[in-house]
């Protein structure tokens, strides 16, 4: 028969074991959240800085996952003091995960090629994270059978990954921002380290030094989190050169930047210039007025994109126009250009005009649920530099637009540069032309490409299309006070020199997206 002291000792030991079991399963859950967030954070930051989100995400996540395999293999060489190793590992992951985003941001601002640093940090994070799960399973082997042990740990891991996949796009990035999300996630790793220090306090030598390190790291992460906005602002000032007067992350994962130099305003989305106030009129006059010069008394107009109100500004100059519907996904953009005191004069309060209706919705979804016909449809969307945008340059999308065009109506789209990204431009033209053959009952369909020089962008291209043969010599500009266009120079818009003339291209389909490769290859040739 055991003594009361022995029974009490056994009870205490059993209670401690249960605490350790529960703590490690909770740790598996939390570190799964942290691991996936670090993956998504690296991919998102890389896409934001370098563009081409599909390529960047694929590369980063592929490297991350393979380095986790290296970490899992590496874990076999650790034999002693596994709880102490687990705590140390959490602190190292917190350092790498928390400070990777600001380090990469800073490196991008000062280095010509920051990709090697990105790959090194991603590999180190993945390798450290790959050690975690095998380590937890080995620590738990004293308490569970292998079958139950693996089942419990991987269940916690997969549920944690699911929660991270929901938290990252819906809560963390919109509410905190990229840098703050990294610091917050690192604090979770430190929390796991402190929990492990507590429940394994009898098994970890020199635990007080690890505790002190965890507290110092917590302080550094909190300071980093508090200073993230200031740090980001300073780096963006270095990147954009001009004074940043507005910066905002939106719920649609867009970073909006408005800069000013004297009276000159520039607007950027995810680092890409959208317009320069000194020459935007060249772009918008060329997008709008050649089309309007072919139409008789157009009344109902649709703009897909164009949340800055600059295209609407040009359309509001026509007395015949009764309604303009602007469909722009991001309400932060339209609210900015509707209410900002510097931007309202630029679009001449177009977004406050009673003839303008703003719909914040995906353009494709709007067309699917709307039955209205329009006399003109203008597609003023960002360049097709990712799959989400590429689908809005595809045959099915143009076919859908065509269904909303009146019998005599015309649609026109911005189509990137026929000089810098020649194949991408002619892909847009060919794809828009192919939309006429995509219907169950084919009908006549004609497209006409044209271009203009905008100093901020260089040569820029557009494509118009209609059921009618478009006679560009019949364009009659309205009696308006143009800053750029005039009747005599219209033929130049439709004349393409040899280095911008048509080239063979594939049609952009939802299944293939060749325009992405054309676009990336074209711009890379000029700027890399």
Image (spheres, rainbow, N blue to C red):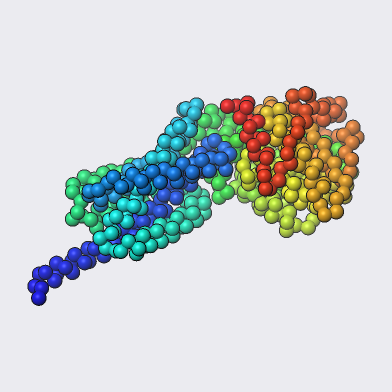
Q: Position of residue 404 (x, y in %)?
A: 80, 52
- Where in the figure is residue 391, as x and y percent of width and height? 68, 46
Does residue 382 appear to the left or right of 175 in the view shown?
Answer: right
Residue under the image location 22 percent in, 63 percent down: 16
Q: Is residue 98 left or right of residue 520?
A: left
Residue 14 higher or lower than 478, as above or below: below
Instruction: Tell me if residue 296 can be seen.
Output: yes
Which of the pair 151/473 is nearer the observer? 151
Looking at the picture, tell me which residue is in the foreground, 52 or 99.
52
Query: What percent of the width, then of the height, locates residue 135?
Result: 31, 52
Location of the C terminus (image quadrant): top right
Instruction: Give me the residue at 48% from left, 44% from top.
Output: 61
> Which is more toward the observer, 29 or 510?
510
Q: Look at the image and tell me whether residue 322 can be seen.
A: no
For this orientation, the residue located farthest to the top is 498
**What x and y, as percent, mark residue 315?**
78, 42
Given residues 270 and 155, the one toward you in this image is 155
Residue shown at the point (60%, 27%) measured from the top left? 527
Q: Quadrant of the N terminus?
A: bottom left
Q: What is the number of callouts on the image?
A: 0
Relative to residue 99, is residue 246 drawn left or right?
right
- The residue shown at (88%, 38%) is 470
- Vertical position of residue 398 compared to residue 195: above or below: above
């Amino acid at each position: 028969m055991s003594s009361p002291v022995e029974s009490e000792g056994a009870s205490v030991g059993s209670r401690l074991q249960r605490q350790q079991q529960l703590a490690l399963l909770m740790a598996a859950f939390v570190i799964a959240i942290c691991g996936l967030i670090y993956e998504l954070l690296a991919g998102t930051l890389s896409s934001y800085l370098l563009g081409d989100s599909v390529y960047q995400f694929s590369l980063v996540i592929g490297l991350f996952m393979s380095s986790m395999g290296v970490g899992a293999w590496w874990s076999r060489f650790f034999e002693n003091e596994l709880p102490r190793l687990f705590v140390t590992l959490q602190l190292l992951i917190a350092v790498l995960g928390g400070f990777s985003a600001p380090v990469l941001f800073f490196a991008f601002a000062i280095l010509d090629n920051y990709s090697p640093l990105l790959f090194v940090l991603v590999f180190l994070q993945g390798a450290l994270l790959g050690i975690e799960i095998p380590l937890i399973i080995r620590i738990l082997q004293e308490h569970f059978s292998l079958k139950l042990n693996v089942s419990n740990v991987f269940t916690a891991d997969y549920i944690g990954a699911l929660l991270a996949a929901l938290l990252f796009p819906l809560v963390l990035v919109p509410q905190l921002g990229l840098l703050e999300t990294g610091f917050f996630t690192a604090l979770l790793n430190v929390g796991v380290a402190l929990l492990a220090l507590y429940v394994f306090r009898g098994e970890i030598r020199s635990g007080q030094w690890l505790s002190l390190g965890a507290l110092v790291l917590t302080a550094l992460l909190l300071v980093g989190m508090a200073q993230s906005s200031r740090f980001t602002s300073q780096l963006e000032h270095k990147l954009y050169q001009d004074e940043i007067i507005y910066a905002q992350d939106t719920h649609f994962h867009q970073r909006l930047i408005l800069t000013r130099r004297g009276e000159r305003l520039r607007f950027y989305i995810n680092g890409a210039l959208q317009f320069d106030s000194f020459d935007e009129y060249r772009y918008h006059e060329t997008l709008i007025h050649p089309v309007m010069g072919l139409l008789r008394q157009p009344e109902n107009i649709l703009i897909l994109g164009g949340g800055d109100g600059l295209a609407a500004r040009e359309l509001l100059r026509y007395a015949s126009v009764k309604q303009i519907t602007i469909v722009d996904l991001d309400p932060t953009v339209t609210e900015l250009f509707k209410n900002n005191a510097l931007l309202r004069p630029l679009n001449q309060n177009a977004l406050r005009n009673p003839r303008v209706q703003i719909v914040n919705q995906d353009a494709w979804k709007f067309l699917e649920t709307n039955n209205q016909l329009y006399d003109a449809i203008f597609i003023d969307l960002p360049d097709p530099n990712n799959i989400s945008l590429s689908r809005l340059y595809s045959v099915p999308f143009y076919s859908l637009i065509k269904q909303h065009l009146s019998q005599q109506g015309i649609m026109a789209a911005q189509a990137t540069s026929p000089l810098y990204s020649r194949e991408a431009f002619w892909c847009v033209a060919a794809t828009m032309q192919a939309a006429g053959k995509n219907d169950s009952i084919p009908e006549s369909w004609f497209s006409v490409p044209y271009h203009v020089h905008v100093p901020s962008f260089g040569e820029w291209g557009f494509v118009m299309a209609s059921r009618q043969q478009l006679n560009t010599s019949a364009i009659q500009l309205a009696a308006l006070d143009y800053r750029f266009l005039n009747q005599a120079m219209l033929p130049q818009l439709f004349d393409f020199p040899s280095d911008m003339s048509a080239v063979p291209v594939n049609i952009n389909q939802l299944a293939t997206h060749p325009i992405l490769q054309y676009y990336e290859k074209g711009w890379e040739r000029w700027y890399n």
